[in-house]
Image (cartoon, rainbow, N blue to C red):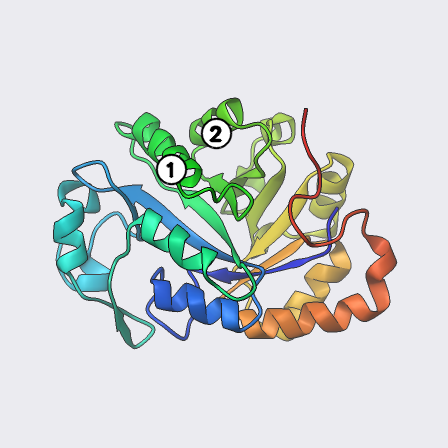
Amino acid sequence: MHEPWAIGHRGCIFEAENTIAAVERASGLGADYAEIDVQLSKDGVPMVIHDEDLQRLADMPEKVENLTADQLQELTVISNGEKGKIPTFQEMVEAVKNTKDKTGLLVELKPTAENRDELVSKVIETVEKCNAKNQCIFMSLDYESVYQLQAEHPEWWIGYCIYGGVGKMEDAVWEYNIDFLAVEEGLASNKFMEKARNSGLAVYIWTSNNFDDMENYLEMGASGIITDLPDLARDTIDRYMKDHQEYYAYDGKGYPKKKN
């Protein structure tokens, strides 16, 4: 598909996850993209945070959807041994636009059943407002969100995220209107990767933090490595590409194709 991307998982492990500092650090370590998680606050603001509640990050049981953006931004979150603040999606987009190498964002939408439409709409609105369409790609575990994004912007690079064992994946996935699959490590068999290639789908594998595993996934045909250690992924991919440049139909810059 395209030359492999180094994708920092929630930014990177060297700063508090999903913070601007984590994404800027990932950019400095050579990440092509930084994966972030976006969900809505009580007052309908897209916020960059992974968990549906704040127990792990802020030692409080409240759900993200029950707090306003201002309340969320007043909190201090702790992860990876570092402290940080919860940014809005717009703040994150504006931050990456100023990174030296124009690092992109892999935006994972995390809707609830009640706010899916609003989340998709607000994410699109933010990307268009910030003129960041060429710096963002998108995915979700919720296929309805993926479908809605594709319907609104078929020219964007949009994928479906899968976790769990191979036996849990439905055959319908291969018929989805998507550009890529983001899959948990356990799914990355040779048979799976061959089927993805035959279906014309790029595959990004998460969360890989081992050099040997990364190299193996690249040999199997992975188009991206999602990792807590973007510096290791950058080094692994650069070494691999020295001998495998001719394998790829597209270079690693920008979307591999434009859709009709």
**Residue 63 as seen in the image, left or right of residue 163:** left
Residue 149 is labelled as 2
Residue at image position (73%, 36%) is: 200
Amino acid type at image mark 2: Leu
Could you give the CA–CA distance between mark 2 and mark 1, rounded to whole angstroms? 9 Å
Quadrant in which residue 173 is drawn? top right
Give the amino acid type for the residue marked by disc 1 in the picture: Val
**Contact (Cβ within 8 Å) of mark 2 with mark 1:** yes
Residue 23 locus on image (x, y percent): 43, 64
Taking the spot 58% from the left edge, 39% from the top edge, the residue there is: 157
Q: Residue 75: x percent and y percent?
A: 15, 61
Among the 4 quarters of the image, the one containing residue 179: top right
Query: In this view of the protein, which residue sits in the foreground, 123 or 128?
Result: 128
Q: Is residue 12 visible?
A: no
Residue bearing the label numbered 1: 123
Crowd band around label 1 with a 10 angstrom C-alpha radius: few (<14), some (14–19), many (20+)? many
Instruction: Pick whichever of labels 2 and 1 is earlier in the sequence.
Output: 1
Task: Kindly indicate the quadrant of the structure image that contains residue 80.
Answer: bottom left
